Image (tube, rainbow, N blue to C red):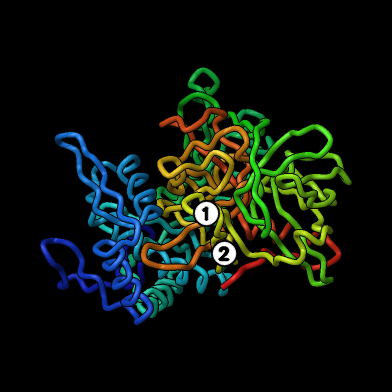
Amino acid sequence: MPPHPGDHLSTVPESSSVMGHPTMPPRRRFLTMQSVALAMAISLATTPVTTWAAPGTPRLPEVEPYVQDMLSAYLRAFPQVSTEQALENLNGQEARLYLLESIGERQDAEFAGSWLDVTLGTFHLAVADPALVPIYIRLAANDAVAAEVTLVDFSLATLHSLAESINNGVDPVLGSLGRDQARVDVKSNTVLVRVSSERWPPVYSKNPMLHPAIQFDEGEPIVVEHDACSSRYSCGAPLRGGVVITRVASNAQCSLGFTASATDGSRWAITAGHCETQLNTLWRAGEQVIGPVRQSGDAGDVDIARIHINRSYWLQSGGGWLYDYYNPSSPANLTLAITYRTTISQNEMVCLNAMNSTPSQVCGFIDYEYGPRGMPQVGFDACPGDSGGAWFFRPPGSSSRWAYGVHSGGSGSCHAITGYSIFTSVPDMNAYFDGTAAARIRIEVHP
């Protein structure tokens, strides 16, 4: 019998379990080495951190500082998750990234999104075409990812298109009612529209023309504020993501996301588009001028500006670096960048490298692949000045760092427990440049 919407098919046999939980299939060698590296990081960390815990609260193990940042984010967001499960989830994220990159390369129109069950560590893939179920089960097994494949009604492309029409105020039923208030929730295979009960006449939910994927999400309207401000910072070559950059003429400040290079040989510094709307304006890092802004866009799912790196001070040192706040004198290498929009998965970890990033306030989880403005939404509250900063992920026990996107804004507060952030994803940025720039522009990496 063919699968039906809502059916779950797993890469792990039902008979295979330990204490009621699915047994993880054997990982490929690179995952095994990561596990070894993680164990070494826990037991032999070169910079151990002993965390005091109040009575009744879990004590974090001694791990490398960046791993503790992510564990702290886990315990804040998911207090029901054990430290051991959190470590296992983090250690498996890179394998899930490779799986989603493989799925993205296929360009399947009926892919419907993905999410991680943080409590059990099970990865969920959703599809709107039953023919994809066995294919995705095989792909997950090839990458040693314990996954369930669920058949649903609507593809991610359908949900994204629907959310986009609502956010633009052109939905045939809602009109302007849900403008900028729609988010895609892949777990429920719906588009959540945030509208106060006073503004949601019952007639809407009974209208036969209303798309069946639309769900009413009662609450205060979503308001996105850009995170720009004025502050000080100084950091020399090489130019690295996460440092503060300053407008030469007025000392307005934002954060730098990544460096990029083009097929015509030019090099670029990438930040948020709302940081600078005037072309040819000079920006600097520390006391060294980077160059002029040559392109800026801030609409829909893109908030990006590129600054032409045309000063020899920065050009001679190369690119593909991030600021390391544990060791400011030594830059951290950026090794990979996600290629496909579908690689962004709900409940996966990302961290922000920007002006106000600190060891205790740096990481969060993807709440929605398509949140406000169609951008990924993260359950971490960034601060004024963080605009343009780099969202990335570094697996435990690994030297790899994956670029996810460039920070745009959020709830308008700073490190509030209930705040959130949104960012321009790397794939959306690439598509923007492909459609507007004469040369092909991509983020620089330093493997």
Quarter of the C terminus within the rendering: bottom right
2 vs 1, front mark: 1
Residue sitting farthest toward the left = 19
Q: CA distance from mark 2 to mark 1?
A: 11 Å
Q: Quadrant of residue 227?
A: top right
User: Is residue 23 rendered to the left or right of residue 366?
Assistant: left
Residue 371 position in % (x across, y down): 55, 43
Q: Is residue 247 above or below residue 332?
A: above
Q: Which residue is mark 2?
A: 334
Residue 379 position in % (x across, y down): 45, 41
The residue lying toward the viewer, choosing from 270 and 408, is: 270
Q: Is residue 218 above or below residue 428?
A: above
Q: Is residue 279 above or below residue 444?
A: above
User: Is residue 3 rendered to the left or right of residue 425?
Assistant: left
Q: Is residue 303 visible?
A: no
Residue 212 position in % (x across, y down): 50, 44
Q: Which residue is mark 1?
A: 324
Q: Secondary structure at mark 1?
A: loop
Please give the label number shown on residue 231.
Answer: none
Residue sitting farthest toward the right = 280
Quarter of the N terminus within the rendering: bottom left
Q: Secondary structure at mark 2?
A: loop
Kind of residue at badge 2: Leu
